[in-house]
Amino acid sequence: MKLLACIGLLLPNLASAEFAYGEYAKENNWDLLLSLGATYGGDTIAEAYYVDENNNVVDDAVLKGGGLFKASVGIDWPLVKDLRLITNAGYHVDTQFSFASTSSGNQGMWFTRFVVEALPYYQINDSFKLGGGLTYHMSNKVGGQFIGSDEKYYARYEDTLGYTGFVGYMLGESRSWIELRYTYIKYDLETAPFLASFCTADCDGSHVGLTFHWAVL
């Protein structure tokens, strides 16, 4: 809770920082973007029930194809007047852990993927931008660790191409902005699953997301 409170105090300060965006935009230069967002949606990729030493269910975990947090670094390139291109690379993760007390420690599952994107957009006016493009997800892995074993289990989904559309809103006179996006993407399992609950083919990873972008250069 303290971390969330600190983030809540920090973001408005970043958004209102004096970066002279108007003069900067007139130069039609490139921006280095640091981005952090939350996403929601998609099919259930895998589900597990956590048990204690007496085989009693103490918790459960559900991984979604479109969840949950995403961080990226990218460059906002000028193309022609009011038309720009964002290229970025990032990390998208959904993770579920059980903190029930057990002799072998905590149990958990996670779904991770590396993401690269190319997103052209149009700067409609001083406040809004509209764009969309391609998103490529690779090294898509589900991992798990369960009670009674120190071993970590892994399964991999094939690399896959998806499509993204977004609308962005500039935060005052700063170069920071927030983005609402929708991404359409599907996953197919490449290796053997380690749980019977795995989604194996045509798994929907589509999601909506809200992202904060901070232009640092």
Image: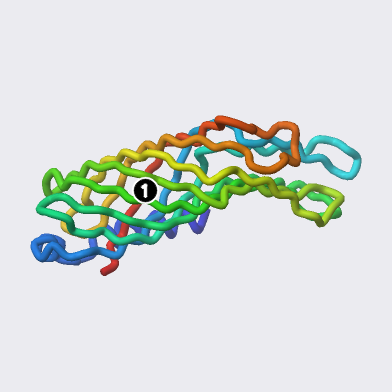
For the point 75% across and 41% down, the residue is: 194
In this view, which residue lies farthest toward the right? 54
Asked which quadrant contains residue 215, the reply is bottom left
Q: Residue at x 84, y 43 (%)?
A: 52
Residue at 61%, 36% in the rendered image: 45
- Looking at the image, residue 20 sits to the left or right of residue 191; the answer is left
Which of the pair 118/182 is nearer the observer? 118
Quadrant into which the C terminus falls: bottom left
From the viewer's perspective, tell me whether residue 192 is left or right of residue 12: right
Residue 203: name its quadrant.
Answer: top right
Q: Position of residue 99 (x, y in %)?
A: 72, 49
Vertical placement of residue 29 versus 81, above or below: below
Q: Which residue is mark 1?
A: 211
Percent coordinates x, y for residue 13 in the rendering:
29, 61
Evaluate whether residue 95 shows in this view: no
Task: Kindly state the secondary structure of the residue where label 1 is placed.
Answer: strand
Give amino acid for label 1.
Answer: Thr
Mark yes or no: residue 196 visible: yes
Q: Residue 48 at x, y = what percent?
A: 72, 37
The residue located at (15%, 62%) in the rendering is 21
Vertically, is 92 above or below 13? above
Q: Residues within 10 Å of mark 1 (few under 14, many from 20)?
A: some
Q: Residue 114 placed where, x, y %?
A: 50, 53
Where residue 78 sits, quadrant-wise, is bottom left
- Counting labels gives 1
Left or right: 126 as drawn, with respect to 193: left
Q: Is residue 61 above or below residue 25?
A: above
- The figure's colour scheme reads rainbow
